[in-house]
Amino acid sequence: MLIGAHVSCSGGLEKGIDRACAIGAEAIQIFASAPQSWRPGAHTDESVAQFRERAAAAGIDDIFIHAIYLINLGTESPEQLGEIGRLA
């Protein structure tokens, strides 16, 4: 069993790995974008590469992306379904 936590990536994706290491997490969950916005995150190639390098060095292979808060799978409104609503 892995022990993990939801960690902040404020300041760059790679900061999430640093924060996970600081608490001894073996797995993490992050937001890839602001949780209260439909706007996707704008991560640079450098930040993504640093995230991957730090995760590999730390042995953190289990990384989960938390869905934004605006998605509501119980709604009839396509807008609240996000991309799923556009596919329906």
Image (cartoon, rainbow, N blue to C red):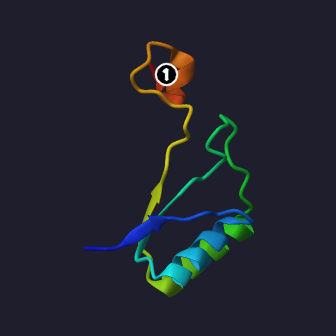
* On-image quarter of the N terminus: bottom left
Compared to 52, does 87 lie above or below? above
From the top left corner, tell me how far across and down residue 35 is, in percent. Answer: 61, 43
In the displayed structure, does residue 27 sit left or right of residue 44?
A: left
- Helix, strand or loop under label 1: helix
In the displayed structure, does residue 31 sit left or right of residue 60?
A: right
Compared to 33, does 9 lie above or below? below
From the top left corner, tell me how far across and down residue 72 is, in percent. Answer: 47, 27
| Residue bearing the label numbered 1 | 85
The residue sitting at the top extreme is 76
From the top left corner, tell me how far across and down residue 10 is, in percent. Answer: 70, 62
- Seen from the viewer's position, the closer of residues 84 and 80 is 80
- Give the residue displayed 64% in from the left and 63% down from the top: 9
Q: Amino acid at mark 1?
A: Gly
The residue sitting at the front extreme is 23
- Give the residue displayed 73% in from the left and 70% down from the top: 46
Compared to 83, does 66 lie above or below? below
- Give the residue displayed 67% in from the left and 43% down from the top: 40
The residue sitting at the left extreme is 1
In the displayed structure, does residue 52 sit left or right of residue 46?
A: left
- Crowding around mark 1 (Cα neighbors within 10 Å: few <14, some 14 to 19, many 20+) is some
In the displayed structure, does residue 66 sit left or right of residue 51?
A: left
Compared to 37, does 43 lie above or below? below
